[in-house]
Amino acid sequence: MGKLTFGPVFIVDGFEKVMNEMPAEKLGKTHRQKAILEAINKIQQIQNK
């Protein structure tokens, strides 16, 4: 996670570490990852028309 996030502050329910200390696999996809994947999908749909 980036330095300008609240990751260093929050402990995720069920874990004993702050978000920045957890591997990405434990946290799942971020909102940014979800958004870019959705954008890629929409662009591909437009190109396939």
Image (cartoon, helix red, strand yellow):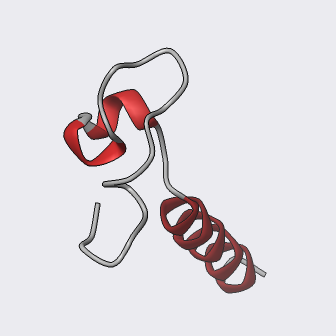
Name the residue located 33 percent from the left edge and 31 percent from the top edge.
Answer: 25
Q: Is residue 14 above or below residue 18?
A: above
Nearest the camera: 13 or 46?
Answer: 13
Residue 15 on image: x %, y % = 40, 19
For the C terminus, give its image quadrant: bottom right
Nearest the camera: 46 or 14?
Answer: 14
Can you name the residue that lies furthest to the top here? 14
Name the residue located 71 percent from the left edge and 75 percent from the top edge.
Answer: 42
Q: In which quarter of the image is residue 47?
A: bottom right
The tally of labels here is: 0
Residue 7 on image: x %, y % = 37, 55
For the N terminus, give its image quadrant: bottom left
Nearest the camera: 9 or 30?
Answer: 9
Task: Report whether 5 appears left or right of 39.
Answer: left
Name the residue located 50 percent from the left edge and 15 percent from the top edge.
Answer: 14
Task: Report whether 1 appears left or right of 28.
Answer: left
Task: Report whether 29 appears left or right of 47.
Answer: left
